[in-house]
Image: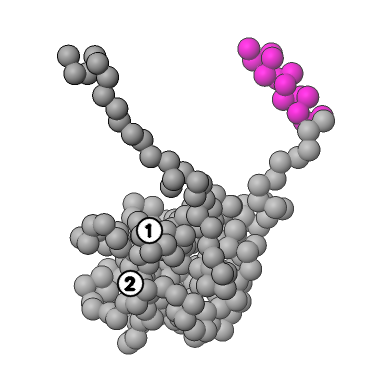
Amino acid sequence: MMLDFRIAAAILNAFHKGIDSDLGDGPSIAARMLGRILKPNLLRELVSAKRLDRRSASFVDMSGDSIPGFPFLTLADLRILALGSYQLEQALSYDAEHSKADGRYLIQLCRHTGPLELTSHGISAEDPMLIRGRLQSRHQNSTKYFIYILVDVEKFGVEAVVEYTYQCKNGSRTVGCCAHIMAVLWYLRYGRHQPEIPLPAASQDEVCVVETSTDEDST
């Protein structure tokens, strides 16, 4: 079997067009991974120290008017932040569900007001803006998770996104980001300007399973 595998791999390498899912961003993604592999999540530490999860905030539904002055990011920048296209595709699902009247998730945002004391937590930003987000299940009111994204409005591209964190298990990582954080970043940069956000595999929403009984079931 291994011999057959090596033959098939050799044929693909010789004649198949190269597969590059990251559109040539591989070197930039690899450099970012190496540069952040030992980086702690400083924003998570600040959120915990300030107890921001317990502070009240005027959250409103994410819309085209949310967070004016958000820094400029290209799709290539978002791919580098996400370390590839996978999280971008996942983010589209969250944004599409948010846009649907009967979607599963609701994303709400607000801009944090008040002092942050960034330098005391080792964070540097010329003109910081902390975006607070809340991801809530439309069907379970008790299910809420908080998103925090710190941007520097004086910068552009990847460097404008200074720190981020989320309450899910993968939300505190600094190498890449989870789909929830990317959902907010993608929407604020692109989604708000689209007439409609397509829901991946939307055709499956029309699929339902009908259970029917048989003679064997009734006996």
Provide the residue designation for mark 2: 46
Provide the residue designation for mark 1: 103
Contact flag, marks 2 and 1 (Cβ < 8 Å): no
The correct choice, above or below, for 1 with respect to 66 in the image is above
Quadrant of the image occupied by residue 214 = top left
Q: Tell me if residue 5 is in the magenta stretch.
A: yes
160 vs 122, left or right, is right
Q: Tell me if residue 59 is in the magenta stretch.
A: no
Residue kind at label 2, given as amino acid type: Leu
Judging from the image, the colouring scheme is: one colour
Nearest to the observer: residue 88 or residue 217: 217
- For the N terminus, the image quarter is top right
Nearest to the observer: residue 83 or residue 124: 83
19 vs 131, left or right, is right
The correct choice, above or below, for 135 with respect to 86 in the image is below
Quadrant of the image occupied by residue 159 = bottom right
- For the C terminus, the image quarter is top left
68 vs 117, left or right, is right
Image coordinates for residue 12, horizontal then vertical, percent = 76, 28
> Which badge, 2 or 1, comes first in the chain's sequence?
2
**Residue at the image point whose x is 29% and y is 81% from the top:** 58
Q: Which residues are magenta?
A: 1-14
* Dot 2: element: helix
Image coordinates for residue 215, horizontal then vertical, percent = 24, 16
Residue kind at label 1, given as amino acid type: Gly
Image coordinates for residue 113, horizontal then vertical, percent = 34, 86
Majority secondary structure of magenta residues:
helix
